[in-house]
Amino acid sequence: MKVKKHIFVYTMLVCLLGSSPLLAQQYEDYFQVKAVPDTTSIRLGEQVNISVTAKVMLYALKGASLKVVFPNLPDSLNHLEVVSRTPLDTAGSNSQQKLWKQTITLTSFDSGRWELPPMKFEVFSVTDGSYDSVFTEPIIIDVTTVAVDTSKAFKPIKPLRRVAWNLLDYWPWLLGILLLVTGVVLYFVYWRKRKPAPKPPPAQPLRSPYETAMDELAQLGKDKPWNTDVKLYYTQLTDILRQYFEQQFHIAALEQTSAELLQNIKPVTVLNQQRDKLQSILTLADLAKFAKLQPSPQEHEDCLQKAIAVVEWTKPAAAPAPEPDSTNQKK
Amino acid sequence: MENTSYDIRQLNERIHQASAFVDLLNMEINKVIVGQKYMVERLMIGLLAQGHVLLEGVPGLAKTLSIKSLASAINARFSRIQFTPDLLPADVVGTMIYNQQRNEFVVRRGPIFANFILADEINRAPAKVQSALLEAMQERQITIGDSTFKLEEPFLVLATQNPIEQEGTYTLPEAQVDRFMLKVVIGYPTKDEERHIIRQNLQPEGQTKINPVVNPSEILEARKLVREVYMDEKIEQYIIDVVFATRNPEEYKLAKLKPLIAYGGSPRASINLALASKAYAFMKRRGYVIPEDVRSVCFDVMRHRVGLTYEAEAENVTSENILSEILNAVEVP
């Protein structure tokens, strides 16, 4: 009986001693963290990139979901300055494992041997709320100053270093010049090959205001619009006269009232006794246009004749014929 | 109803006879008013066309004397209101006062109850007083308490503005200025006229007395005839063209005026231009309107109805400049 009891106790001890490292080994396997510097020795101000990795083996999770919290390094610690942190990279994850990577860049401006303390990674089980933490190994970084040989004299500042000339450095200019030359050549080719501009049709001889007015008055006499619409006739008659004055004497006759026209035409032409004729035409026309006056047929004819007389009287004098060349006569 | 040529000839004769009093009136007023024919003519246009007149001119140009003389010559009641910053609407239109003996409120009529009102320096009174007067001008009636009183016809308001002193004044808003049919700008008399004025004012027998030559009833008859004056559709079109050119100058080859005009003439401008043209034709003893009539009154009817932009003011362009351009561009029928 005693022997059986001892066997049971030893068996339990073996089981306990054997299971503990196993469990520990399993735990270490399922969650691993690493911090690996690219160098451990820098000069003042140089940078060290520390690659921080956290790896979780999915087989150990058994369906439970975990949350890994990366260490939150302060910007400055133990003579070391954090220059930058890259975002978490999970590109290495696959169906077997979950992998998070981050690169932390450090620098230091104090010479000496500085230790980056162990970084604490925390892991939470979302499923059962359990919590654990894992630390990285500490990293020792040697920061040295630049070695100066004080036994030698000061050297002058180095001149600017010249860069070798390279044609490709000027490619935008070259491209621009090339395009410009191409454009000029194309335009020149187009200019050489284009069709000659069509010749303008021969200009019609311009009719003088006098000729136009006389023709229109003659046409009015032929049409005799007073037989159908007296108002229209007097409107056309005064319009012909006003247009004639406007073109011949350059006064805004169409925009002037009868009184203004009589007043303003005085300085530009000599009407003499024709002035009364013009006044009577305009007065009678105003009455016909604005007061529904119905002048007699004789008055219509008279007005037309008076208008012709006024235009005849005010027509410009014909230009004098050119005199024969006196030098030719002498010869 | 379509007017025939016979109707117009008859109308012309009637107007020729009925308008004879205009010469009489002119002669009587000219006994005391030297020069300022233009202003007197515009007053008569306002009287005949049932419109009110806003006068702009420096003090001492016989504005008060003119309207007083006109009132005397027509045998009508004249009243003058000096507009001041402390004036109240009740000072113009009247108010209810308590009669202790009769133990009741009675109406006390204000100075507006007259035929001819001179609202002197209208821009010196605050907006509520201006508004009271302008409402009376428009409605031609006054309400005091519960009672409404019709204003006696003829009713003509002549308001004055001083163009040089603008400090402490209340500028009339555009909507209220629009209620004046005419805005007349008057200037100084000529040298000869000024000499005549001095002599007339210093004569030992004193100021010449104006005799009544026309009755108010004759004026009312004349007003009816003014509205009968024949206006051809060509003249109507001319008026419309002038007013539209103030609104859309680019349609009349006046695009350069577009940035200078803030707003053009309202339909009230067209109505007043037509009415004033008829009154002018009546005064010229004609029964029909001709383009000269429109052009004669155009500046006075339109100058306060064309709004100027800041650009125009910066370039010293006046509404008269704009109207001149328009009249020179719109074709006369």
Image: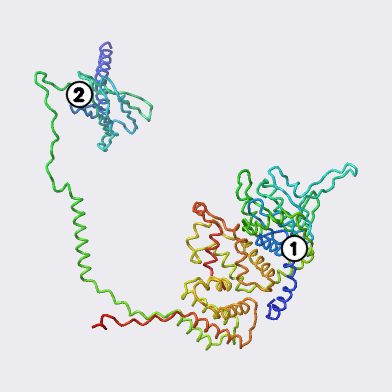
Residue at the spot of label 1: B28
Q: Quadrant of residue B65?
A: bottom right
Against A72, residue B166 (above or below) is below
- Please tell me how many numbered marks the rendered image carries: 2
Mark nearest the camera among 1 and 2 is 1
**Could you tell me if the residues under marks 1 and 2 are in contact, i.e. CB atoms within 8 Å?**
no
Give the position of the N terminus of chain B as an image quadrant: bottom right
Query: Separation of disc 1 and disc 2 at Cα?
Result: 113 Å
Q: Quadrant of residue A84?
A: top left
Name the kind of residue labelled 1 in the image.
Answer: Glu
Give the position of the C terminus of chain B as an image quadrant: bottom right
- In the image, B266 versus B207, the foreground residue is B207
In the drawing, does residue B120 fall left or right of residue B305? right
* SS state under label 2: loop
Against A35, residue B206 (above or below) is below
Mark 1 falls within which chain? B
Q: Quadrant of residue B271?
A: bottom right
